[in-house]
Image: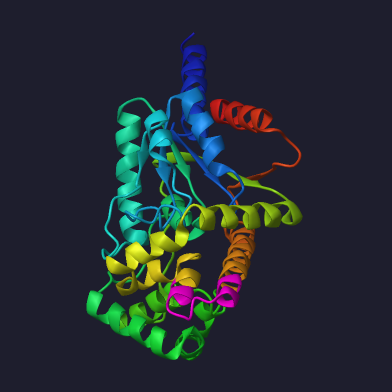
Amino acid sequence: MYDIAKKRALRHSHRTLRQRVKEPVKRQKVLILSGPTAAGKTSCSLSLAEKIGGEIISADSMQVYRGMDIGTAKVTLEERTRVRHHLIDIVDIKDPFNVMTFYNKAHDAIKDILSRDKVPIVVGGTGFYIHALIYGPPCGPPSVASVRKKIEDEMEKQGPEVLYERLQMLDPDYANTITERDRQKIVRALEIIYLSNRKVSSFKAHKSPSDYLFNCWFLFFPKEILDERINARCEVMINEGLIDEVKTLMQKGLLENNSCANAIGYRQAIEFLQGSQSENEYKKFVEAFKAASRQYAKRQFTWFRKKEPLFRCLNLQDFDIDRVQEIILQDFEQS
């Protein structure tokens, strides 16, 4: 009897141990909706939030700025009344805002939302910010305003091509992961090198934090349809007063913030306002705005395809919006 009881006890202890090893730690869920510009993330997120008691955290690097409304397709006050939003209109145009600030504020917002038994829904197309939220903030020393300003001034005087070539010489491995169009990344990379005397590529990447279970979706339309949607949205923004918005922001210090001044739509409008403002220049402004927006959408596709394995794609040409929400909600509940 003793041997039988002992064997049973051993089997029970082994079974308990296996269960402990196999059973994952239950993590709180966070829903992430991303996709290229003009894909319809906002309308989908609002409806989802209303259905599951969610609150939205913006992952848009420009919507944090007060006054950058039309050119960022910022959610309206009426939409913010429908669903509570976080990380929108939190800094003035002259204030600095970077990925580290976003990471800290986004995690604070997630904790706050979960503490009230609501569902955090992160919405936006800034891949760099979303990547940091999931995997941890980028490595390297904290930013130093004077050093960054010096590099940004060089960028304005010499152009991104010259600074990108410098980065290629100093850290070819990291330079190969970005392009000369990635102004902010070039500036930050050079800042890290100047402050630490180390290559950016020498810093080890952060490991994914285990606090949350991220449920990630990438919503998109095929290129032909998306290009039409982007062109139409640019026209709407212009008709709604984008140029007047840029005029007002220039008076408030827009040109002192390189990140904002180089944002799509704002950069093209600034160039138009600083030029002759002739009819021909206006046409060039419209086409340049549309082209830059389409190019940005292409870069968003590339980023998420290469860097974000957690994201599952939903082609919005194949499903109506109700079916899209049903797929996302079903998966979210079962994950």
Quadrant (top left, top right, bottom left, bottom right) of the C terminus = top right
Residue 133 drawn at (x, y percent) = 42, 51
> Image point 70% across, 33% down: which residue?
320
119 lies left or right of 297: left
Figure check: 104 above or below 81? below
In the picture as drawn, the residue positioned furthest to the front comes out as 279
Residue 64 drawn at (x, y percent) = 35, 53
Name the image quarter holding residue 249.
Answer: bottom left
**Could you say which is closer to the camera, residue 161 or residue 105?**
161
**Could you say which is closer to the camera, residue 248 or residue 230?**
248
Q: How is colour applied across the structure in the image?
A: rainbow
**Could you say which is closer to the camera, residue 85 or residue 312?**
85
Question: Is residue 63 visible to us here?
Answer: yes
Residue 141 drawn at (x, y percent) = 29, 72
Figure check: 122 above or below 232? above
**Magenta segment, which residues?**
270-283
